[in-house]
Image (cartoon, rainbow, N blue to C red):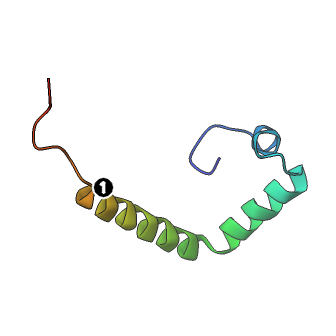
Amino acid sequence: MIEGDQSPVYVADQLDVSLSDVYEALSYYYAHVEEMREIERENDEAFERVRGSSLKPKEQIQ
């Protein structure tokens, strides 16, 4: 929703939460933008570490 095109109503419906919960989360996000961006950066870095260390086959078996 922050970077997407879903409406708050759609998100509330999909997550089975109240519309007021969605707006409360948005309010928190906008009150703490830098903190939220740092968390997103940390999550992205963790994802890249896990992806880089995952086991991959050396060759495909046919």
Q: Nearer the viewer, residue 43 or 30?
A: 43
Q: Position of residue 12 (x, y in %)?
A: 81, 45
Q: Nearer the viewer, residue 46 or 6?
A: 46
Check the picture and name the quadrant holding the C terminus.
Answer: top left
| Residue neighbourhood size for the residue with mark 1, other residues' Cα within 10 Å, grouped as few (<14), some (14–19), many (≥20) | few
User: Does residue 56 appear left or right of residue 12 in this picture?
Assistant: left
Residue visible at 49% across and 65% down?
A: 40
Residue visible at 89% across and 51% down?
A: 18
Q: Helix or strand or loop: what does disc 1 sit on?
A: helix
**For residue 4, above or below residue 28:** above
Residue visible at 45% across and 65% down?
A: 43
Q: Position of residue 22 (x, y in %)?
A: 80, 55
The tally of labels here is 1
User: Does residue 48 appear left or right of residue 36 in this picture?
Assistant: left
Residue visible at 73% across and 60% down?
A: 26
The image quadrant of residue 58 is top left
The image quadrant of residue 51 is bottom left
Q: Which residue is mark 1?
A: 51
User: Does residue 36 appear left or right of residue 43 in this picture?
Assistant: right
User: Does residue 34 appear left or right of residue 58 in this picture?
Assistant: right
Furthest toward the left, the residue is: 59
Q: Nearer the viewer, residue 9 or 46?
A: 46
**For residue 13, above or below residue 19:** above
- Label 1 sits on what residue type? Arg
Furthest toward the top, the residue is: 62
